[in-house]
Amino acid sequence: MGSSISWARGLFWKGNRSPLSPFFGSPWGFLRVFWKSCHWAWAIQPRHHLLRLNPQSDPMDPYQQLDFLALDDQFSEEELMVRDAVRSWCSERFMPLVMEHFEAGTFPMELVGELAELGVFGPTVPEEYGGAGLNSVTYGLICQELERADSGLRSFVSVQGSLVMYPILAYGSQEQKQEWLPRLASGEAIGCFGLTEPDFGSNPGGMLTTAKRDGDDWILNGRKMWITNGTCSQVAIVWARAEEGIRGFIVPTNLKGFSAPEQKHKWSLRASITSELVLEDVRVPNGALMPEAKGLKGPLGCLTQARYGIAWGAVGAAEACFDEALRYSKQRIVFDKPLAAFQLAQKKLADMATDISLAQLMALRLGRLKDEGKFTPHQVSMAKRNNVSMALKTSRTCRDMLGANGISLEYHTGRHMLNMESVVTYEGTHDIHTLALGHELTGIPAYR
Amino acid sequence: MNIVACVKRVPNTEAVVKVADGGTSLDESGLSYMISFYDELAIEEAVRTKEAHGGEVTVLTLGPSEGTKEIRECLAKGGDRAELLADSNWLSRDCRASAKALAAKLSDLGADVAFMGRVATDRDNAAVGPMVATYLGWACVTDVVSLEIAEDKGTARRETETGIETIEFSLPAVITCNKGLNEPRYSNLKGIMAAKKKPFEESPAELVDNQASVIALTPPSPRAEGRILGTGPDAVPVLIDALRNEAKVI
Ligand SMILES: Cc1cc2nc3c(=O)[nH]c(=O)nc-3n(C[C@H](O)[C@H](O)[C@H](O)COP(=O)(O)OP(=O)(O)OC[C@H]3O[C@@H](n4cnc5c(N)ncnc54)[C@H](O)[C@@H]3O)c2cc1C
């Protein structure tokens, strides 16, 4: 094996390079060798991984994405630039805070301005409404990078873009678009999406929340549950049953009769606010009704967008766990050699690398189909179902490989594993997507 | 103001790299690249100078034709146009040849000021900036940590091992940027979209032969094993003795 040289990233980034150091005397001064007397280290070290035992909580940490099938070749320069920009932002700005917020059950609201500046709120929205007019593959890559950091971060951005900006863009009036989209893109307003109710999750068509006409106004009554960002939103997209069927409303959260108490004691998706929405005789003008959303296909159309992002996001979460477990397994000495030198560990790594690569392919293909205007909700169901279940399984395997460290928030894997329990449930549970696929394949609905 | 930021595309410092067969260069297969850290400071300073004084920022690089992504990232961060001097062998080009090629282009461009990194993070020579200035007959201030530019002159502060110097210089000038000069901005999605539409010109680099070439590339010898001098308070005098008489550092 040729010798490997690891570039001394930490030293020059921290700017504390000492000219006296004998390690930097050579013309290749910034090269540093991680020389291990143990020959295992050489034998098993693939090119893209630094030999470090540190947990990843260091913002300087070099996350290395597995790209076994060289899929980077399939992306345009611009797509890669966006991905890398979001990746560095996450590493440098979000990762140093994530453990603290996950533990506290809070979202770092102070970063909302930076997220907006980065441009991740509704990036596919046309520029005239404050978006960046990006394609869907780029949006997918953004979700992948955000969820590599934390599902809470990706959820924040998914809700804002796919569940709040998207319905306004797709179903809203010109006035509604002009009023809300630029404010949502700039982070001046945060939005939430209220569909689920205490008794109706997988079957939102049964919802009890009502919208009744009162002259030119509407009166909304009901209760929504499990609403991401409810408590910190300025505006809620509320789905309610009207006489003519399910309709969607753009509801400012400061209206009389509207409240959004936070749901506490979650052990998953903790770096994200989840809330109830309580609507007691909330009066909104007819201008709050989105004219083009009629029936259940309104909210379902939004969910298709968000699920698309989740199919990519799950890859990011799985990648984060895999990266950590691979690194760890090469460092952790058990029975006198690295964990990675045991066949049982290698099988796990081989399986996970394969699963991740397949999920990447599915996300990419789906993205290209979406950009060609050809993707179907059933394809999204397949990708959401497969990729999230892959990420859940991968995170559990990685958690196991980290031993006791796997249950510590000092490492990322345990946090991702807990998050995946939410992601596998929201936006259509795994089994609901199974039924959707079964329905599509056989033509026979088996939901009830 | 005609502002140029000279940037180098270097192997990613987070990657683990190998010496290629032959032992004189890096194995480039699967290597990822980035803009040298100090050159990020150069871009940022160039953009800030434009924001303060108006004008245009040209991003100038000597590098391979295919290395456009990293240069476009500089456009996303506020550069207005890019000039790529094509050199597929840029990683093993010596300082003189690199400096000559850059100087020729800077002269063509009629730059008022050229910002460069204090050193490129791959070769660690810290020579190209001063050499460019010498070939052009321009002022040169290295390792700059703060800077003010007026009409035809500027004031810079440079931090060295021995102290802090404040320097007044005339324009045109080459400024090499050191950590602390600024905090480089992140590129954002709109900047990236805009970068796609900015002018990007490629021309062959005017190259002279290397006068100095790498003939062997070897990792530093392994660090000697540590020595335990003792434990607890008893070890303190032994440690002091070792630091004083062996290491001669106190
Ligand atoms: C952290 C978090 C954030 C969320 N954010 C939002 C949000 O922002 N907005 C929003 O509207 N909602 C949100 N949700 C709600 C989420 O979408 C629902 O929880 C989800 O749709 C499942 O509904 P449920 O919890 O009522 O489960 P149920 O529908 O009661 O399902 C329970 C179990 O029954 C299974 N099941 C259901 N129907 C069938 C069937 N026909 N055949 C076989 N099995 C079936 C399910 O697969 C599941 O295993 C969020 C949830 C979580 C956990």
Image (cartoon, coloured by chain):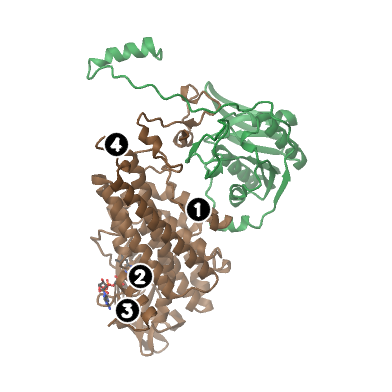
Chain colours: A brown, B green
The answer to which of marks 2 and 3 sits earlier in the sequence is 3
Quadrant of the rendering where the C terminus of chain A is positioned: bottom left
| Secondary-structure class at tag 3 | helix
Determine which of the numbered discs, if any, sits on residue A204 in the image: 3
User: Given the image, what chain letter belongs to the residue carrying mark 4?
Assistant: A
Residue at mark 1: A70
The answer to which of marks 1 and 4 sits earlier in the sequence is 1
Q: Nearer the viewer, residue A336 or A206?
A: A336
Horizontal side of residue A201 vs A183, given as left or right: left
Horizontal side of residue B92 vs A400, given as left or right: right
User: Given the image, what chain letter belongs to the residue carrying mark 2?
Assistant: A
The residue under label 4 is which amino acid type?
Lys
Picture coordinates of residue B32 (x, y %)?
Answer: 53, 45
Q: Residues within 10 Å of mark 2 (few under 14, many from 20)?
A: many
The answer to which of marks 3 and 1 sits earlier in the sequence is 1
**Above/below status of B98 relative to A140:** above
Are marks 2 and 3 in one subunit? Answer: yes
Residue at mark 4: A337
Q: Is mark 4 within 8 Å of ligand 1?
A: no
Are marks 4 and 3 in one subunit? Answer: yes
The answer to which of marks 2 and 1 sits earlier in the sequence is 1
| Residue pictured at 38% horizontal, 42% vertical | A58
Q: Is mark 2 within 8 Å of ligand 1?
A: yes
Determine which of the numbered discs, if any, sits on residue A427 in the image: 2
